[in-house]
Image: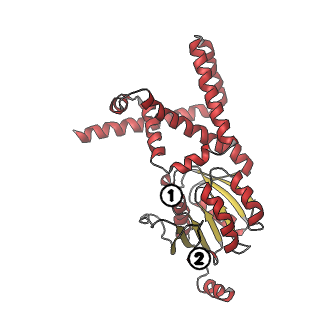
Amino acid sequence: MVDEQRARHDADPRPRVAVIGYGNVGRLFGDLLAKAAWHVTAIDPHSPPEPSPAGGVPDLRVQADIGRPTPELRQALSDIDVVIVAVPERAALAAVDVIDECVAHDVTIVETLSRKARFLQAAEDVLAPRPLVSLNPLFHPSLGWVGNTVTASVVRGGSNVDRLLHLIGEAGAQVHHLSPGEHDRCVTVVQAVAHAVILGFATTLPRLGLPPADVIACSPPPARALLALAARVLTANPETYWDIQNSGEPGATARTALRDSVDELDNQVLTGDDTAFELAFARLRTWLGDDLDRFADDAAHLLGALVARRSDSRTADR
C-alpha cells in the first residue's frame, strides 16, 4: 500500500485534500483548492450538485456518509495530505474516530464549525499529533471570499496549514487569528445573538396576527432588511443555526443578554423613563466609538439598495 501511494504521488505530486461534506462550505473550500491546482476529493452522502461555473471541479467524488464509512471512503482517506471537515457538529464528532482510523499521522486536519469546544475536545487526544487548524468563514459562501473574514485557531501548525491560510488570504479574505476559547467567547456569542434577533423578529410577526402581504407592503427599510435577513436564514440548513444556539454557554449567554436588553427597554417604556432611553443611545454611541459613522454609512448603502430593488421590481411588474 505504501509503495502504491508513493507511486500515485510521484505521478501526481499535487497536494491532496479530502473535503468531508460538500455542501456550501465544503464547496467554498473545494473550489478554492481546485483552482489552486490541489487534488480535491469531495465526500458527501448526497448526489453531487452541478459545479459552480466560477469554481473548480473535484478530481474525485465519493458518495458516502463519514459516520458509516465504506471501503471506497476509507481508500480515499488513506492517500491524502489534508482533511477538511465541513459538516454540522453531530456529523463532525462522529467523524473523529473514522478520520483517526483512516488517515496517516502527518495529515493536516481542518474543521469549520461555528463552535470549537466540543470538536476540539473530542479531537485533542484522538487526532494528535496531526496538525490541526480550526477555521470559521464568517459569511455565507455565496458571498465569496473577497472582503470577508475567516477566523483561524491554529491548534498544531504545519506547512499545509500555512499554505491553506495563505490561499485564503490570496482569495481576498481577512484571516483573523484567535484561540478556540476566544472564538467561542466572542464569535459564537455574536452569531448566536444575531441569529436570535433575526429569528425572534420573524417569529414575532405571525404571533401578532399580521397578514404577510400587508407586512411586506408596508415595511419601512429597516424592517425590510430584517425580513431579507430572515429569508436568508430560513433558506439555509437549520442544523447550522441549531449548532450555534445549542452551543452551550455561548448560546445561553447570548440569549440571556438579549432578554435582559428587551426587559430593560420594556421597563423604560412602562415607567415612562425617556431619560434612560436616551442614555442607552448615548452609551451605545460611545461603545461603537469611531466605527459608528462607518456602520451608519453601511446601513445607508444597504437600505438604499433594498429600496432600489423594490422600485425595480414594481417597475418590472407593470
Farthest front residue? 68
Instruction: Identify residue type, mark 1.
Output: Asn
Decide if residue 289 is in sight here.
no
Label 2 secondary element: helix
Q: Residue 154's x, y, as percent?
A: 73, 58
Instruction: Identify residue type, mark 2.
Output: Ala
Farthest left residue? 318
Q: Residue 268's x, y, as percent?
A: 60, 16
Estimate the spatial distance between the alpha carbons at disc 2 and disc 1, rounded to whole Å.
Answer: 21 Å
Q: Quadrant of residue 266?
A: top right
Q: Quadrant of residue 251?
A: top right
Q: Residue 48's x, y, as percent?
A: 45, 67
Residue behind mark 2: 76
> Residue shown at 63%/83% (left/top)?
9
Left or right side of 80 for 41: left
Specify which label sits upstream in the sequence, 2 or 1: 1
Q: State the mark number for residue 24.
A: 1
Depth check, front residue: 203 or 264:
203
Depth check, front residue: 8 or 32:
8
Decide if residue 216 is in sight here.
yes
Left or right side of 227 for 191: right
Label 1 secondary element: helix
**60 in relation to 254, above or below:** below
In the picture, the quarter occupied by the N terminus is bottom right
Label tally:
2
Name the colour scheme: secondary structure
Neighbours of disc 1 within 10 Å: few (<14), some (14-19), many (20+): some
Q: Residue 262's x, y, as percent?
A: 59, 25
In the picture, the quarter occupied by the C terminus is top left
